[in-house]
Image (cartoon, rainbow, N blue to C red):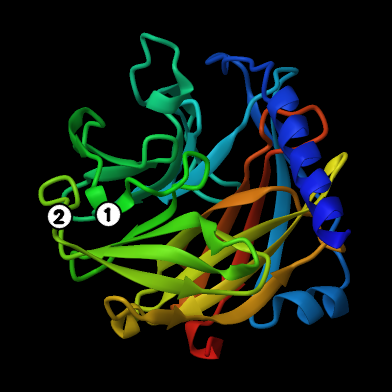
Amino acid sequence: MRRSIALLILVAGAISTTWLRSERVTPIRNKTLTFVTEPRPSEETLKAHLGPFHLEKAWQMELGSWKFGGYSALVPLPDGRMLALSDLGHFLVFAPPGGVRATPRFGNLLDNPQHNKSDVDVESATRDPETGQIWLGLELRNEVVRLNSGWARTGSARPEIMRHWGKNSGPEAMARLHDGRFVLLSEGPIEWWRSHRHEGVVFSGDPVENPEAAKPFVFEGPQGFDPVDMAQLPDGRLLVLMRALVWPFPQRFAGRIVIGDPAQIRPGKVWKVREVARIASSLPIDNFEGMAITPAEDGMLNVWLIADDNNAALQRTLLWKLKVNPADLP
């Protein structure tokens, strides 16, 4: 009976998501991007859920009267701006409040002449700070696309090791490590009755150049949560953002932030991570799917989260600015 109820909820959630995604509006370049401050919970509530992370501020991002969003990946740029990427191949470059002043830019990062979502479904992204190259993880194709520093496409690959990942549970999280390796995580669990384990793969270098130079491993996180993004700390550890749908009508979400050392990833073995923060309903949350890390003063770090609103009427594009001392992380 419980299995039947769970299946009905999952089907209802899928139908809801499909219906809400059916109407999309293309971002308009000459509209003003605004950040509306969200009410901040008490310090006690924040501490109980976020642990070592301090929520500096949360905003709802708006573009005039136009509905925009769908951003599922977030990449910091060297000039202090952020690059947000959507599952329709759109990009948004913006300056977070309190930082540099810059006019936001919108556009299409990937050409889509056939208007086929599967060709542009960007769910993850990572950047090489030295060369400016960007790699995109496309979910429906289980593909990695590489762009040069001018954001022109220079190659792509569909690694055999990822071919069996589900069409809607592909490379949702990806990070280029400081040593040049790439780590990718599948959103879908290996087995639905053990939803804390997900397939992962580590490439010894650029997956576009050598897609077969890869080793599989198993990512083990909190039960019921799926990895949706990750970013590397200066000391080498990885923060992984995780997400769960907790109610389909209207859609409600919860999240987790976990930490792990990629040096402990072993081919064919389980890589276990540790939970360090809970993104709960008592906080200003939505469907958080993108995460980025930037330096702050006095050795602190900013951790940015962005929500994918699925271009749905009842969801929002939220931006969080968290601050953390890396020494306080386990």
The image position of residue 291, as x and y in percent, is 52, 56
Which residue ends up furthest to the left in the rendered image?
209
The three-letter amino acid code for the residue at tag 2 is Glu
The image position of residue 78, as x and y in percent, is 33, 51
Between the C-alphas of marks 2 and 1, the distance is 8 Å
- Residue 292 can be seen, yes or no: no
Query: Residue drawn 62% across and 80% down?
Result: 276
Q: Nearer the viewer, residue 321 or 280?
A: 280
Q: Nearer the viewer, residue 123 or 142?
A: 142
Image quadrant in which the N terminus is located: bottom right
The image position of residue 176, as x and y in percent, is 28, 60
Which residue ends up furthest to the top in the rendered image?
113
Quick one: SS at disc 2?
Answer: loop
Earlier residue among tags 2 and 1: 1
Quick one: SS at disc 1?
Answer: helix
Query: Residue drawn 42% across and 80% down?
Result: 271
Query: Residue drawn 49% across and 26% down?
Result: 88
Q: Is 302 drawn above or below residue 158 in the view shown?
A: below
Q: Is 88 drawn above or below residue 84 in the view shown?
A: above
Using the rendered view, name the quadrant where residue 269 is placed.
bottom left
Contact (Cβ within 8 Å) of mark 2 with mark 1: yes
The tag on residue 212 is 2
Residue tagged 1 = 161
Pointer 1 local density, CA inside 10 Å: few below 14, some 14–19, many at least 20: some
Q: Is 123 drawn above or below residue 65 in the view shown?
A: below
Query: Residue drawn 52% across and 15% down?
Result: 29
The answer to whether residue 307 is left or right of residue 211 is right
Q: Nearer the viewer, residue 123 or 28?
A: 123
